[in-house]
Image (cartoon, rainbow, N blue to C red):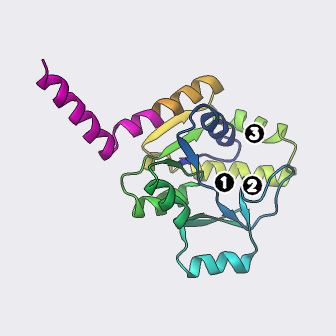
Amino acid sequence: MISAPSGGGKTSLIKSLLEKDKRVSLSVSYTTRAPRPGEINGAHYYFVDQHIFSELIARDALLEHADVFGNRYGTSRDQVEEKLAAGKDVLLDIDWQGARQTRESFPSCCTIFIVPPSMAVLLERLTSRGQDTGQVIAQRMNKARAEISHWSEFDYLIINDDFDEALKDLQSIVRHGKLNRPGSRKLYNNLLAELLENR
């Protein structure tokens, strides 16, 4: 799971990771917010109304869900379980609330929190996007401070100062997580036992 305050660079890092590692699959979340320019239903998010989102919650179809800036976001339980059953590494792009909920179902999951190098850099990133009003940016900055206060709940922390270095850190963490999964450990233990047996 990867979390970050708005403007932390999470989306760009995830996109680059997916381009470089085809074994990683991104879980597509549900949201009640309207699509932004260029966003495609089913690829970036599943865009649904409040009624459908409430039905998903009632059916326990969501692994996690949260309200963010007046919109609701949630992860499909079936989608994640199907990908895991197929042997894929599943990446969740969620906030700290979602990460906390997901850990209840998957205690062994790997959690990563991405932060900007400073609040000044974060403000510059939010402003340069040109997507939000000054009032919305101020709200995002306040929310970012609250989100960052939860950093200690995560397994790993990446400071996104230099994008290439942050991406290397992310790739290393994902690889480390794969090597330490129970199935992987069994595979490596068997291989090592065979190698030592044939000395």
Residue drawn at x 77%, y 64% is: 33
Crowdedness near tag 2: few (<14), some (14–19) or many (≥20) residues, C-alpha within 10 Å: few
Q: Main secondary structure of the magenta part?
A: helix
Q: CA distance from mark 3 to mark 2?
A: 11 Å
Q: Is residue 91 visible?
A: yes
Residue 1 appears left or right of 192: right
| 82 to 58, vertically: above or below | above
Residue 24 on image: x %, y %: 54, 42
- The amino acid pointed to by label 1 is Lys
Q: State the extent of the magenta-drawn residues as a range.
A: 174-199
Q: Which mark is residue 143?
A: 1
Q: Nearer the viewer, residue 101 or 178?
A: 178
Indicate which disc, 1 or 3, sits on the residue closer to the N terminus. Answer: 3
Q: Position of residue 152 (x, y in %)?
A: 44, 46
Q: Which residue is mark 3?
A: 123
Q: Earlier in the sequence, mark 3 or mark 2?
A: 3
Numbered label tally: 3
Tag 2: residue type?
Answer: Gln
Which disc, if any, is residue 139? 2
